[in-house]
Amino acid sequence: MQDARFEDGREAPLNLGALDVDDLRVISSLAQDAVFPVTEMTWDRKAHRFGLLLNRFRWEDAGTARHAPERVQSVLAFDTVLRVASQGVDRSDKDVILSLLSVTFEAGEDGGGDILLTLAGDGAIRLTVEAIEATLKDVTRPYKAPSKSVPTHDD
């Protein structure tokens, strides 16, 4: 038997699914402080799918002592979406950059309910869903965070 090598422990891209509230909390924590242009969200009404292309801060990255903080582009997608509504989101201004604070679920009947994407600046996106069915998947290599710092929140 051979000892593990450092190279064996390298981090891999995230590819997570959520089918319940606990799973969604994990996705929310990993997507916290993700930023995205307003143009990078889409709803396919026919397929009942809503998606965002995020620039996600890599909260799971344990290597920040060795390198600068990193971000990675990720797709956050939700299936079984029946309706999408937003508040405080100006889709007409194509230069707007939004920041995701949290992803939560408000239960309705028969497993359905509303997924609430809370944004910085009092914005929100509400997805009415038949059930929780979400994925978070990294789609690029990590890159140095342009801010060169870890996001912080004022209490």
Image (cartoon, helix red, strand yellow):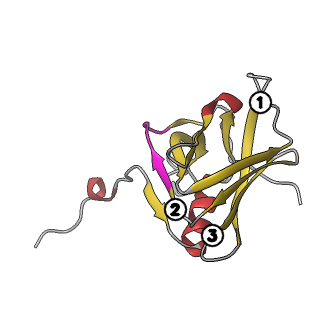
Q: CA distance from mark 2 to mark 3?
A: 10 Å
Instruction: Give the spatial CA distance, label 1 vs label 2.
Output: 25 Å
Q: Position of residue 20 (x, y in %)?
A: 55, 73
- Label 1 sits on what residue type? Arg
**Label 3, residues with CA under 10 Å away: few <14, some 14-19, many ≥20:** some
Quarter of the N terminus within the rendering: bottom left
For the point 44% across and 36% down, the residue is: 140
- Whether residue 152 sits left or right of residue 136 in the image: it is right
Q: Which residue is mark 2?
A: 133
Which residue corresponds to the image point at 44% horizontal and 53% vertical from the top-left? Answer: 14
Q: Amino acid at mark 3?
A: Gly
Which is more toward the observer, 52 or 145?
A: 52
Location of mark 3 (residue)? 112
Q: Earlier in the sequence, mark 1 or mark 2?
A: 1
Please state which amino acid type lies under the numbered disc 2: Glu
Q: Is residue 131 above or below residue 91?
A: below
Q: Which residue is mark 1?
A: 91
- Labelled pair 1, 2 in contact (Cβ < 8 Å): no
Question: In x, y percent, where is residue 121?
Answer: 87, 44
Q: Residue at x 59, y 54 (%)?
A: 81
Within 10 angstroms of label 2, few (less than 14), some, or many (20 or more) residues?
Answer: some
Looking at the image, residue 97 sits to the left or right of residue 25; the answer is right
Q: Which mark is residue 80?
A: none
Tell me the element at label 2.
loop
| Between discs 2 and 3, the one toward the N terminus | 3
- Give, as a single range, the part of the protein colored magenta: 135-142
Pair 1/3: label in front: 3
Q: Nearer the viewer, mark 2 or mark 3?
A: 3
Is label 3 in a helix, a strand or a loop?
Answer: loop
